[in-house]
Image (tube, helix red, strand yellow):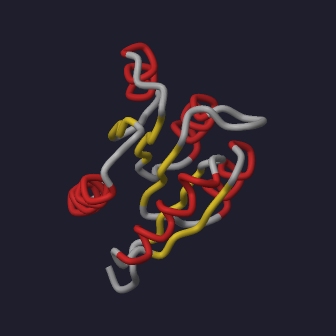
Amino acid sequence: MGHPPRILVIEDDLNVVQGLVSGLRRAGFETSLAMAGDEGLERILKESFDLVLLDLMLPRVTGFEVLETVRTRASVPIVVLSARTDLPARLQSFEGGAVDFVPKPFFMEELIARIRARLALGS
């Protein structure tokens, strides 16, 4: 890639956002933010991102709804980052098209390693 990988973070918790965006930028990623599901969905459909980090519990449009819509209208890889760690939520995420699931709380180093691995796979 000729540019730093572009990552869209769709997350409504300001405490998570601050550390997440800061850590991703330090790791060399170009990072954009959406604080609600509908805003994130609109950005995915209108802009070009290399990867999306998606929370499941979002205002207005849930992460599951974002996955369902994106699956039929875009091909960007989505990594779910959620405090919903129950098996049904994980399975529904993968069935909805997520390429990975990272439970909260998470280690930033592991998340960055997973993102880099996913981007290296080209999907």
The image quadrant that residue 99 belongs to is top left
Determine the residue positioned at 33% across, 57% down. 108
Q: Residue at x 39, y 24 (%)?
A: 90
Picture coordinates of residue 6 (x, y %)?
47, 70
- The outermost residue toward the bottom is 2
Q: Is residue 11 above or below residue 119?
A: above
| Residue found at x 62% / y 62% | 33
Tell which residue pokes out farthest to the right in this image. Answer: 60
Which residue is more in the foreground, 4 or 107?
A: 107
Percent of width and height locating residue 122: 27, 59
Horizontal and vertical percent for residue 43?
67, 58
Q: Is residue 80 left or right of residue 116?
A: right
Task: State the count of labels.
Answer: 0
Q: Quadrant of the N terminus?
A: bottom left
Of 71 and 20, the residue lying toward us? 20
Give the image location of residue 105, x and y in percent: 40, 41
Identify which residue is drawn at 40% across, 84% down. 3
